[in-house]
Image: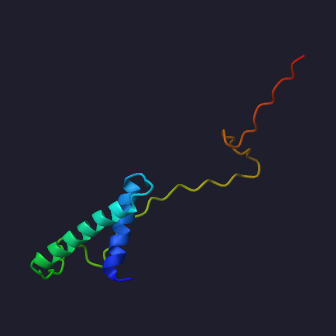
Amino acid sequence: MSDRDHRIREAAYHLWERAGRPDHRSDEFWALAEARIAAEDEAAADAPETKKKPARKSAKAAPADTPGPKPNKTPKAKPVKPDQKPIETAATKPAPKKKAKK
């Protein structure tokens, strides 16, 4: 299979999917894809070839040895003293016991 045939097959598949995958219309989507690829090839042949210029480096770029922004540090938990009871939060508290109905 040539590159052109592969491109037509891919384009026909995408057209078929966009149309909701209808049955018995493969010839229609193939013809549409052929026309689209032919137009793309013709436009590419008519377009003047341009050389891409290398991207310019920004004058405001920081030197490589300049450190970036400092990462956010989360505060560390303070250790609990042996005679101190740890603080209970909603995440660490046990759920309240439900009273039994009589």
Where residue 35 sits: x, y (%)?
Answer: 24, 67
Please tell me whether residue 82 is drawn above or below residue 46 in the rendered image: above
Please tell me whether residue 24 is drawn above or below residue 92 in the rendered image: below
Where residue 83 sits: x, y (%)?
Answer: 76, 48
Please tell me whether residue 86 is drawn above or below residue 55 in the rendered image: above
Q: How many marks?
A: 0
Q: Residue furthest right?
A: 102
Q: Is residue 77 left or right of residue 31?
A: right
Q: Residue at x 34, y 77 (%)?
A: 5
**Quadrant (top left, top right, bottom left, bottom right) of the C terminus:** top right
Rendering quarter of residue 26:
bottom left
The residue closer to the viewer here, 4 or 54, is 4
The reply to whether residue 80 is in sight is yes
Where residue 101 sits: x, y (%)?
Answer: 87, 19
The reply to whether residue 56 is in sight is no
Q: Residue at x 69, y 41 (%)?
A: 88
